[in-house]
Image (cartoon, grey):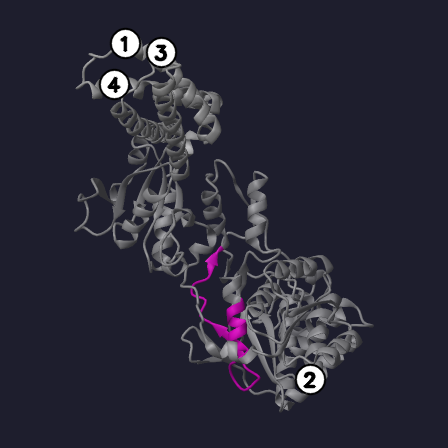
């Protein structure tokens, strides 16, 4: 408390005038020291002369410092420039003093102002030393006081290897850091109980709630490179159970200039806890396939479309054409690209359902590659509006695919979903119909290569479960989960978009690309982790409420449809789904009939037609289950 008061006092009252007065006093003290040094460290000198000289010395020092302005610098931020100003001020003062002493020898206008040259020289050197050193002493004193007054965070570093040492060094290098590293944690029995820089290495088994409480630990920093996802998840769950904040050191590839900065250590989030290794792709063919080309992206303002657009904007395209019917999100993307100094793009407000409008876009810009990300994706909403689902997911895809074929687009890439696999809802079924149409069109195409990418849920996308949970946590809960056992595959947005760009370079057309997404994640477990990551406890602080499966929702998603198998590609995590042979001409006709039927018939008739095209579509928890019962009766 006393230190805090003292710190506030220094901030408030250490004005430039106080600094000026102290500087003048130090010059006077230095003048006294110069006399004692000149007289062999004794007081055997004429005090009568000294008492006449001291006021003149003080006045000359005051004038010199006012001329130079050396007192105006902020003492606690003293640097070399401030030190030079002090040197300059003392030099001017010494010049004035020397000039006055010499003039007084000839004119004798000031009684007792005959100062020996040795004292002038000693005073000059002592004054420079005292004033400069005093400033740096005050600066160091202020830093010590201010650091001690700050709230110190007691932390542990998980990992006593090279990465842990680098993390420890980065924290210590950070100026003004408020961390006190209490210890290291490691699972290597050969390191346990040893010390690094006098800091003990503890076994993870010894880090208990009592240990955390007794040592006032509030943070644990995980610093292990190339850690396996399931091990990271296990460690994080154990640490969160201790009631501490968990942070993580980023991968080596993200270190700035190869060096870790303390501000890169971030709170661990749900993206870090995917139970699989993220797929990384660094394929020069991707760059070669888009450089100097006109590339069109539909649904460019959506979660996937906007990230595809960002990644494409980093390549030297001839033109990037961004199409979306959502005006405000498209404007936001446009402004973001402008802020990032991107100029080779065109943002167009247009609807993929409007064939004539889209044909004008194709005719005007002549795209050579198309990434089709425009779609409706919310399962419950589309279950209520099959008309809209068909118009966008089927009709919109049909328009863009037909125009790609008509205008000789080199490659058409469709963004699909795992919900198209053995669909149980209208949204997934319409995406499956779109896949079938693309496959059918690919059989008759010679110039355009049609490709489909299929992946699971995307973390952080608009309307996905993660942003929903975050809002519910901000509002104090509860978190809503439809079923305790529901699971989903997850990936990050950048990862998904890298896959889409990669797919745009692979195969001869007609392929459906999927990839190894590892284990599916229980939404209930994810909800609990998000509560813990927010520094709260389940169920004490925030509860989880089970609301029941929504219309069309199923417990488990799949990546392969019935009758599909996979073949490998050159990337170990990416596979091609091979569909069984089918009468694609007949399927294409049925898709065209569905689009026409959608304009005039009821929702039930439309869904019945979708089921005719996709026999694997079996409704769940939906009003359309009766259509499946009718089929069973007919059989």
Q: Which residue is mark 4?
A: 35
Of 327 and 231, which appears nearest the observer? 327
Question: What residue is shown at x 37% (from left), y 49% (from top)?
Answer: 236
Q: Which residue is mark 2?
A: 588
Q: In whole angstroms, how far apart are the C-alphas of marks 1 and 4? A: 10 Å
- For mark 2, give the secondary structure: helix
Question: What residue is shown at x 21% (from left), y 41% (from top)?
Answer: 200
Q: Which residue is mark 3?
A: 111
Q: In whole angstroms, how far apart are the C-alphas of marks 3 and 2? A: 116 Å
Q: Which residue is mark 1?
A: 47
Q: In whole angstroms, how far apart are the C-alphas of marks 3 and 4? A: 18 Å
- For mark 1, give the secondary structure: helix
Q: In whole angstroms, how far apart are the C-alphas of marks 2 and 1? A: 114 Å
Where's residue 42, x and y in %?
18, 15
**Left or right: where 567 falls relative to 220:** right
Number of numbered discs overlaid on the protein picture: 4
Q: Are marks 3 and 4 in contact (CB under 8 Å)?
A: no
Residue that lies at the very extreme toward the right in this rendered image: 600
């Amino acid at each position: 408390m006393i230190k805090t008061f003292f710190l506030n006092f220094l901030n408030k009252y250490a004005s430039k005038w106080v600094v000026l007065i102290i500087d003048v006093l130090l010059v006077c003290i230095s003048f006294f020291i110069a006399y004692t040094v000149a007289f062999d460290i004794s007081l055997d000198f004429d005090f009568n002369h000294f008492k006449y000289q001291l006021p003149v010395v003080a006045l000359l020092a005051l004038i010199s410092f006012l001329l130079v302005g050396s007192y105006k610098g902020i003492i606690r931020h003293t640097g070399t420039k401030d030190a030079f100003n002090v040197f300059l001020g003392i030099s001017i003062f010494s010049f004035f003093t020397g000039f006055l002493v010499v003039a007084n020898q000839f004119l004798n206008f000031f009684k007792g102002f005959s100062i020996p040259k040795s004292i002038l020289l000693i005073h000059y050197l002592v004054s420079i030393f005292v004033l400069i050193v005093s400033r740096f002493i005050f600066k160091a004193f202020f830093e010590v006081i201010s650091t001690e007054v700050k709230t110190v965070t007691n932390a542990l570093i998980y990992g006593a290897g090279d990465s842990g040492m680098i993390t420890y060094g980065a924290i210590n290098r950070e100026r003004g850091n408020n961390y006190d590293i209490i210890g290291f944690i490691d699972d290597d029995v050969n390191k346990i109980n040893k010390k690094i820089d006098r800091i003990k290495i503890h076994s993870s088994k010894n880090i208990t709630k009592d240990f955390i409480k007794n040592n006032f630990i509030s943070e644990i920093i995980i610093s292990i490179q190339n850690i396996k996802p399931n091990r990271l998840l296990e460690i994080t769950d154990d640490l969160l159970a201790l009631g501490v904040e968990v942070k993580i050191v980023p991968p080596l590839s993200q270190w700035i200039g190869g060096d870790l900065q303390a501000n890169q250590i971030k709170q661990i989030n749900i993206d870090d806890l995917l139970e699989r290794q993220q797929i990384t792709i660094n394929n020069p063919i991707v760059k070669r396939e888009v450089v100097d080309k006109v590339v069109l992206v539909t649904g460019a303002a959506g979660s996937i479309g906007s990230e595809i657009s960002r990644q494409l904007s980093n390549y030297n395209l001839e033109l990037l054409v961004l199409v979306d019917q959502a005006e405000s999100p498209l404007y936001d993307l446009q402004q973001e690209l402008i802020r990032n100094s991107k100029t080779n793009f065109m943002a167009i407000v247009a609807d993929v359902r409007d064939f004539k409008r889209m044909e004008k876009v194709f005719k005007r810009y002549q795209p050579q590659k198309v990434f089709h990300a425009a779609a409706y994706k919310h399962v419950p909403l589309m279950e209520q509006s099959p008309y809209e689902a068909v118009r966008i997911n089927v009709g919109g895809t049909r328009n863009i695919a037909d125009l790609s074929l008509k205008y000789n687009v080199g490659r058409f890439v469709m963004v699909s979903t795992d919900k198209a696999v053995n669909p149980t809802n209208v949204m997934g079924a319409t995406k499956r119909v779109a896949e079938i149409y693309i496959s059918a069109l690919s059989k008759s195409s010679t110039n355009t290569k049609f490709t489909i990418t299929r992946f699971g849920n995307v973390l952080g996308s608009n309307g996905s479960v993660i942003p929903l949970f975050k809002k519910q946590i901000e509002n104090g809960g509860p978190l809503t989960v439809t079923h305790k056992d529901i699971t989903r595959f997850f990936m990050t947005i950048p990862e998904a978009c890298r896959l889409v760009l990669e797919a745009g370079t692979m195969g001869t057309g007609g392929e459906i690309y999927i990839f190894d997404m590892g284990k599916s994640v229980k939404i209930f477990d994810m909800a609990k982790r998000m509560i813990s990551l927010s520094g709260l406890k389940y169920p004490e602080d925030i509860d989880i409420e089970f609301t029941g499966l929504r219309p069309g929702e199923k417990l488990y998603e799949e990546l392969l449809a019935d009758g599909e198998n996979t073949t490998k590609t050159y990337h170990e995590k990416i596979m091609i789904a091979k569909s069984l042979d089918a009468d694609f001409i007949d399927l294409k006709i049925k898709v065209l009939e569905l689009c026409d039927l959608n304009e005039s018939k009821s929702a039930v008739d439309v869904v019945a037609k979708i089921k005719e095209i996709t026999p694997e579509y079996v409704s769940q928890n939906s009003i359309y289950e009766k259509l499946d019962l009718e089929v069973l009766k007919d059989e």
